Image: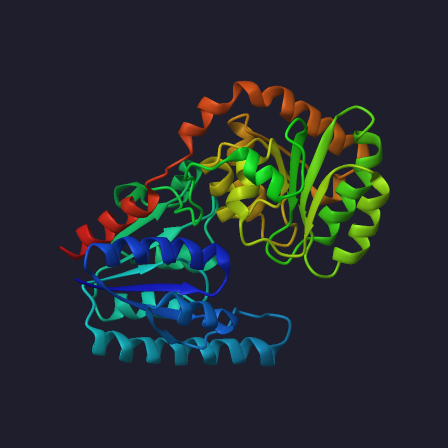
C-alpha cells in the first residue's frame, strides 16, 4: 500500500509519526511525508523517508497582515498537497495534528482519499477539531480525549513512544552518568530546549530538599542555563549529571526514581511507558493542552501537578516526597494509559482504513 503521513516538524508530532512510518515500512508499505517541517528538514532527510515541504504557518492573529499571510500560506499548502496526492495516489492518509498536517489531510478529504487523524493530547488542537468532522477515523492517545469526538469513528491506540524500553544494565548507566547507585535519582527536564522556570524552581529547591532526602540529579537544562546551573550544582554538593541536551533519554528514564518535567503529549506517554512517577509543571502557553495531559496521570494517582505560577520551594519539595512515597504502590495503574504497541495499533488502523 501507499500511505501518506501528514505532520508538522515539532517533536510531539514528528516522533510518533516516525514510529508508525517505521512500522508500516517493515510491512512493505510505501511512505510519503507531507507537512511543515522547517527546522526539522535535516531530521527528515536523516530518516530516509520521502517528504515534501508544504510551507504552511501557524495561524497568527496578532496583526491583520500576519493573519492574512498565514491564511495565504495555508491555501498554498493545500494546493501543493493536492498535487502531491494526485502524483503519489495514496491508499490512505494519516495526519498527526497541527497546522503542518492540516493541508494534507484537508486535501485528502477534498480528493476523497481515505483519511484519519491521530490526536496526541488529552484535549484536541484546533486543526484536529476541524478535521475530525470529515475524516473516516480518529485515533486518540488518552481515554479523556474521546469526549471531543464522534464515538462511532474514534479508536484508542495510545501514543507511539520513540524510546525503547530494552533491557539495560542499571549499574553501568549510573557509572556512565557519574552518579551513585544507592541514592534516589531525580530526573529534571523541560523539553528539548530546556525550561528556565523549571531550572530555577528545582535549583531553588535543592538546598532544603537535600536536608531531608538523600538524592542525586540528572538535569537537562537547555543551552541558556547550562553554565550558571553547573556552578550552582557544584556549590550544592550533591552528585549530578547536567546536560544542555540529552539524546539518551531512555537511559535517564531507566535509572530515575521520579521525573520533574513539562507535560507534553510525548513526555506523558514516555512517563507511562517507563512507569515513572512524576511532578508535572504544564507549559502555561499551550492552550491548556499540557494541563489536561498532566491530569491524565494525576487522576490515576501517577503524578503530582503544580501550575508554573504556583511553584514554590515548599510545594515542590512536598510533591517530590509525596510521589516518592506513593510511587511504590502505583506501578500497576500505568496499564490503564500505557500502550507499548501504539505504533502497531495505528499501523493496523490506517491499513484497515485503506482496505
Is residue 135 shown above or below 42? above
Residue 318 placement: quadrant = top right
Q: Is residue 8 left or right of residue 133?
A: right
**Looking at this view, is 61 or 329 the one in front?**
329
Q: Is residue 38 left or right of residue 154?
A: right
Quadrant in which the N terminus is drawn? bottom left
Q: Residue 353: x percent and y percent? A: 19, 53
Is residue 325 shown above or below 354? above
Residue drawn 32% across and 41% down?
Answer: 341
Q: Residue 315: x percent and y percent? A: 76, 31
Q: Is residue 292 visible?
A: no
Residue 78 placement: quadrant = bottom left
Residue drawn 54% across and 47% down?
Answer: 249
Q: Is residue 199 visible?
A: yes
Q: Residue 349: x percent and y percent? A: 24, 48
Residue drawn 66% across and 54% down?
Answer: 194
Q: Residue 90: x percent and y percent? A: 20, 67
Residue drawn 74% across and 50% down?
Answer: 197
Farthest residue in the left direction?
A: 355
Amino acid at each position: 500500500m501507499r500511505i501518506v503521513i501528514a505532520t508538522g516538524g515539532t517533536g510531539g508530532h514528528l516522533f510518533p509519526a516516525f514510529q508508525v512510518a517505521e512500522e508500516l515500512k517493515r510491512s512493505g508499505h510505501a511512505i510519503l511525508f507531507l507537512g511543515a517541517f522547517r527546522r526539522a528538514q535535516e531530521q527528515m532527510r536523516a530518516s530516509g523517508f520521502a517528504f515534501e515541504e508544504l510551507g504552511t504557518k501557524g495561524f497568527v492573529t496578532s496583526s491583520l497582515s500576519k493573519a492574512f499571510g498565514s491564511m495565504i500560506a495555508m491555501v498554498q499548502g493545500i494546493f501543493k498537497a493536492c498535487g502531491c496526492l494526485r502524483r503519489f495516489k495514496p491508499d490512505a492518509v494519516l495526519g498527526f495534528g497541527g497546522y503542518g498536517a492540516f493541508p494534507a489531510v484537508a486535501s485528502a478529504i477534498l480528493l476523497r482519499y481515505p483519511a484519519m487523524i491521530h490526536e496526541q493530547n488529552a484535549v484536541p488542537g484546533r486543526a484536529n477539531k476541524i478535521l475530525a468532522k470529515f475524516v473516516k477515523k480518529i485515533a486518540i492517545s488518552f481515554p479523556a480525549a474521546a469526549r471531543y469526538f464522534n464515538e462511532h469513528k474514534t479508536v484508542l491506540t495510545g501514543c507511539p513512544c520513540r524510546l525503547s524500553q530494552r533491557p539495560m544494565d542499571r549499574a553501568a548507566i549510573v557509572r556512565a552518568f557519574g552518579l551513585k547507585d544507592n541514592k534516589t535519582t531525580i530526573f529534571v527536564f523541560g523539553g528539548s530546549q530546556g525550561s528556565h522556570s523549571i531550572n530555577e524552581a528545582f535549583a531553588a529547591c535543592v538546598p532544603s530538599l537535600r536536608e531531608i532526602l538523600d538524592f542525586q540529579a540528572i538535569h537537562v537544562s537547555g543551552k541558556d542555563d547550562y553554565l550558571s546551573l553547573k556552578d550552582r550544582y557544584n556549590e550544592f554538593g550533591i552528585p549530578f549529571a547536567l546536560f544542555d541536551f540529552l539524546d539518551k533519554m531512555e537511559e535517564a528514564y531507566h535509572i530515575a526514581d521520579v521525573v520533574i518535567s513539562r507535560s507534553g503529549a510525548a513526555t506523558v506517554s514516555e512517563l507511562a511507558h517507563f512507569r515513572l512517577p512524576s511532578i508535572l509543571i504544564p507549559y502555561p502557553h499551550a492552550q491548556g493542552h499540557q494541563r489536561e495531559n498532566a491530569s491524565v496521570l494525576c487522576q490515576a494517582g501517577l503524578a503530582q501537578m503544580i501550575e508554573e505560577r504556583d511553584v514554590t520551594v515548599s510545594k515542590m519539595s512536598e510533591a517530590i516526597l509525596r510521589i516518592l512515597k506513593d510511587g511504590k504502590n502505583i506501578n500497576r495503574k500505568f496499564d490503564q494509559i500505557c500502550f507499548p504497541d501504539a505504533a502497531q495499533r495505528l499501523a493496523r488502523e490506517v491499513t484497515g482504513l485503506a482496505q
